[in-house]
Amino acid sequence: MLLRRLLSSGCLARRELGRTPFHGLGMAAAGTREAEGFDRPAREGLRYSPFCTASAPCAEDETRVVEDLSPRRSVIQLRGADRYSFLQGLVTNDVEELEREPSGSRRCMYSLLLNHKGRFLHDLFVYNVGDGSSLLIDLHKPSLDSVVKVLTRYKLRSKVDILDVTDRYSVVYSSSLGGAEGVAGSLAFKDPRHDLLGYRCLVEQPPGSVGGEGSGPSAHAALRYTLGVPEGDREMPTGKAIPLEFNVDALNGISYTKGCYMGQELTARTHFQGLVRKRLVPVTIKAAGDALGSISRALSGEGGEESELEVVDPERNARKGGRKVGALLAAQDGKGLALLRLKGLKGKEFRLRRKGGSAED
C-alpha cells in the first residue's frame, strides 16, 4: 500500500540495490572481484526514500533536453468515421474523451492493448492532432507489425483505415515546452503519464532529420527509470505483464468508467479487490568495472547475450543461493526498473543473478 500511495501522490520511492554479486555476467574479467566487494552482501540494502516530487523536480528538469526517439518509435495513422469507436473497444483508456475535445484542440492519451486474458500486449500513445479526420498512434518500433495485425483482425466492417506513417513522422522528447517549441513544425503534447516527463512531440519530418540527441545513453530513459515509468515491450513483457503491477493505473493509462474492452475482466477485478502483490519500482545498481554495461547488454540482447536477471533475497533459502523476489527488467548507467514482491521489501539487501544461477556461479 505504501508504493500505491507514493505513486498516486506523484512521488515514487527510490530503491537502492547495493554492491552485490552479478553472477554469470563475466565479472571475473574485471579483475577486481574480491577487492571491490563482489563476494560480500551490501550494507546499504534496499530502502524507501522520497526521490522527486512535483514541488522538488528531478535534476533532469533543470537542463533543457531535446532527444529524437524515432529510432525506437513507429507511428500509425487511423482515418475514417469509426476511428474512435473502433479503438474504444480495444484499448484500456477512454479514447472517446479525445473525440469530445473542442474542435481544433490537441491532446495525447496513454493506453494499452491487452490480450483476452488481460495480459499486456503493447502500450500506445494516441494523439488527437486536431485535424478532425485522423488519430495518430506512437508505439514501440518492434511492436509495429503485431499492433497492425491486431487492429486489422478486429477492424471487421468498421469504417477505418490503418496506415503505417513511420516514414513521415519523427517522435521527439523535450524536457520543457520551450524546447518543444524550438523544434520546427512540431506538435507538442504534455506526456500524460507523469508531470515530470515533459513533452512528446510529433514532427512531420522523416525520422533522423529532426536533430537533437539520438545516440548514446538516452536522457529520456534515464528520467523514466528514475520515476519508475516503463515503456515498450522489453520493459513490460508481452503476454506476461499484468498492467497494475507495472503502475499503469498510476500513469493514467486505464479508465474504470468506460465500457468493455479486450482483457478488461482481470484488470477491473485486480483494481477493485486491491490485490497487487508485485510492483515495478525504480532501482539504483552499484557495481565495479564493466558490470553495469554487462547488465544493460544482457537485458537488451545486445551482442546476442539476452538473458533474464533475477533479484534474490540471500537471507531466504540461503543454501540454494537465496530466494527469487523479482526480476530486473531495464538498466542504463546504474539506473533501472525491477519488478519486485512488495511483502518484506523494506530494509532488505538483495543480489542479482542470471536466471537459474546460484550464489556460487
Image (spheres, helix red, strand yellow):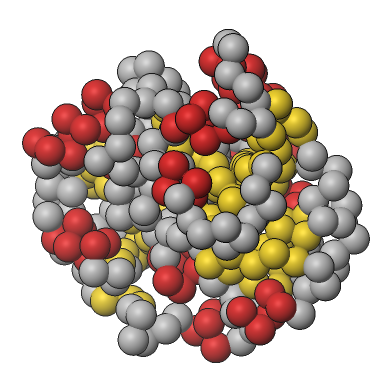
Q: Residue furthest left?
A: 273
Which is more toward the observer, 185 or 336?
Answer: 185
User: In x, y percent, where is residue 15?
Assistant: 31, 64
User: In x, y percent, where is residue 240?
Assistant: 40, 26
Q: Is residue 223 visible?
A: no
Q: In this view, does 212 lie to the left or right of 234?
A: right
Which residue is pictured at 55% across the width and 88% down the height? 62
Which is more toward the observer, 99 or 145?
Answer: 99
In the picture, residue 268 is in which quadrant?
top left
Q: How many numbered marks does the figure carry? A: 0
Which is more toward the observer, 266 or 106?
Answer: 106
Quadrant of the snapshot with the C terminus:
top left
In the picture, residue 53 is in which quadrant?
bottom left
Q: Can residue 49 be seen in this view?
A: yes
Which residue is pictured at 77% across the width and 33% down the height? 164
Which is more toward the observer, 221 or 87?
Answer: 87
User: In x, y percent, where is residue 227?
Assistant: 41, 65
Which residue is pictured at 70% across the width and 26% down the height? 161
Quadrant of the snapshot with the N terminus:
bottom left
User: In x, y percent, where is residue 26?
Assistant: 59, 46
In the picture, residue 325 is in which quadrant?
top left
Q: In this view, does 62 lie to the left or right of 211?
A: left
Which residue is pictured at 53% across the width and 82% down the height? 61
Q: Residue furthest front?
A: 103
